Amino acid sequence: MKCPGQDMQFWNEAAIFEATCPGCGGTIEFYKDDTNRKCGNCGNRMVNPRMDFGCASYCQYAEQCLGTLPEEFVGNRDNLLKDRVAVEVKRYLKADFKRIGHAIKVAQQAEKICREEGGNLAATVCAAYLLEVGEVEALNKFGASAAEHRVRETTTLAETILGKLGAKEAIIQEVCNLIDHSLTLQDTTHPDYRVLADALVLAGLEEENKHTPLTAARLTKAIDNDLLTGSGRQLAEKMLKP
């Protein structure tokens, strides 16, 4: 079956449109399934401004379906995977809204810090989401969330979920390594571990502050002793200081 979004029988008059070339200001005509078109006036190649490449971040047939993907998209493909992981984690946790909320907070903080620190955004944010489901799995199976159980269960779930989404082996391995570092406190100098560790601290402080406003002493202690990155410390000051 052909993807309905790419099948002409489902198209309407909006399927063909014109866009302004950023190179010369001329007009480029696009069909909705064009990944990119060359300007007939100046030769500049422009990415389709209306095309949603979201499905291509996880679909193994993306290249065959969409043709040759533009370089701008290929470079971000791994990063888009984190959104699919978020959906899978929410499905797994079902109505456990407390855990879902915590996972989202950790992932949001990880993304903010990672963008500032220049780490592996896809692996770090995916690991941030998956840590929560690994703890649940360990509790369900063993009645405890000891590090050894959490590492095994979280990495197994990570491999299953990321494999289902068509992630490349390299990123699956990176996520699993990051989970292992985070739960066993190995190689705390690894930059992506430091990002994830700070994201966990910030999410915890945010939840703590919601119930009981943090004192200046508590906040200062966290900034000085618990946060490992400059970006994490700046976020704490900005987010939590009265």
Image (cartoon, helix red, strand yellow):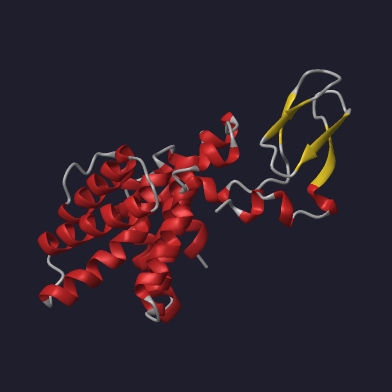
Residue located 51% across and 42% down the image = 62
What is the quadrant of residue 141 in the picture?
bottom left
Where does residue 217 sit, x and y in percent of width and height?
35, 66
Residue located 30% across and 66% down the image = 132
What is the quadrant of residue 114 in the picture?
top left
User: Considering only vertical position in the picture, is 4 above or below 24?
Assistant: below
Where does residue 107 sit, x and y in percent of width and height?
42, 58
Q: Answer with left or right where residue 215 lies relative to residue 53.
A: left
* Residue at far top of view: 42
Residue located 77% across and 41% down the image = 31
Quadrant placement of the N terminus? bottom right
Residue 5 visible in the snapshot: yes
34 or 41: nearer the viewer: 34
Q: Answer with left or right where residue 19 lies relative to residue 152.
A: right
117 or 209: nearer the viewer: 117
Where does residue 165 sit, x and y in percent of width and height?
40, 52
Residue 215 visible in the snapshot: no
Q: Answer with left or right where residue 216 lies relative to residue 16.
A: left
What is the quadrant of residue 43 in the picture?
top right
Where does residue 226 sit, x and y in percent of width and height?
29, 55
User: Considering only vertical position in the picture, is 23 above or below 56?
Assistant: above
Residue located 59% across and 34% down the image = 67
